[in-house]
Amino acid sequence: MKLHKESKGTIIVASLLFAVIGLLSIYFLEMWSLAIIIPLLIIYGLIFWFFRVPHRDILNHKENVIAPVDGKVVMIKEVDEDEFIQGKAIQISIFMSPLNVHICRYPVSGEVIYKKYHPGKYLVAWHEKSSTENERTTIAIKSLTNHTVVFRQIAGYVARRIVFYCNEGDQAKAGHEFGFIKFGSRMDIFLPIDTEITCKIGDKTKGGIDVIAKMKE
């Protein structure tokens, strides 16, 4: 199983911590040490599972908006996007549980024209205000269809580390990785008001594969 590069520090710390706790439990608890060691091994395995990098066959897309993350669609609504679009947009929000793959991918192809990191709160990721009050990043792309698409990585109550690798001027390719969020959170996508939405609330998405909307040329 291939692991994401963001796993290195977490796995080193977890390995040392679990080794110390395991040895201490064996020394002090003897035959009862399995009550400690078995749960630790399960948690250790879940950490590896969280940082997995699944193989995805990414296609080329122009009009299609691709799911940027694995998760569940929890919101589709018309909103005012005040940071960059400064007008009406359709917001699609996808919630990621700790068991989902947490690689973040570009939803559309085009050019990165804006990026910004915002410190903030750690409300639960499905809270509507988390989009504007939580720690987050905002990225905007001028798509191949000449539309502006904005999307946000949002930290949640558990997720406390957002990573994004893109810079203004970079060429974005729909479905390809631009960042990572550790341990559960949310992704918001803001699309032009006349976009055709092809997903619905409750849909489970596969990042880089599933088409969630189509933009008019």
Image (tube, rainbow, N blue to C red):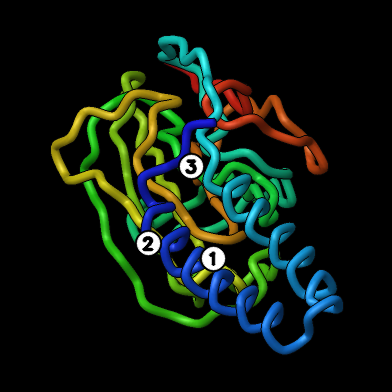
Q: Report which residue position mark 1 lands on.
A: 131
Amino acid, disc 3: Ile
Expressed as whole percent of the image width and height from the top left, the position of residue 33 reads 79, 76
12 sits to left or right of 70: left
Q: Report which residue position mark 2 lands on.
A: 9
Marks 2/3 in contact by CB < 8 Å: the verdict is no
> Which quadrant, please, contains the N terminus?
top right
Q: Secondary structure at mark 3?
A: strand
Q: CA distance from mark 1 to mark 3?
A: 19 Å
157 sits to left or right of 215: right
Q: Report which residue position mark 3 lands on.
A: 103
Identify which residue is drawn at 47% across, 58% down. Answer: 11
Identify which residue is drawn at 50% across, 34% down. Answer: 53
Q: Secondary structure at mark 1?
A: helix
Is label 2 or label 1 in front?
2
Question: In the rendered structure, which disc, 2 or 3, sits on the residue that comes first in sequence?
Answer: 2
Amino acid, disc 2: Gly
Expressed as whole percent of the image width and height from the top left, the position of residue 56 reads 53, 19
Q: Secondary structure at mark 2?
A: helix
Question: In the rendered structure, which disc, 1 or 3, sits on the residue that comes first in sequence?
Answer: 3
Expressed as whole percent of the image width and height from the top left, the position of residue 150 reads 40, 46
Amino acid, disc 1: Ser
Q: CA distance from mark 2 to mark 1?
A: 28 Å
> Which of the 4 image quarters holds residue 21?
bottom right
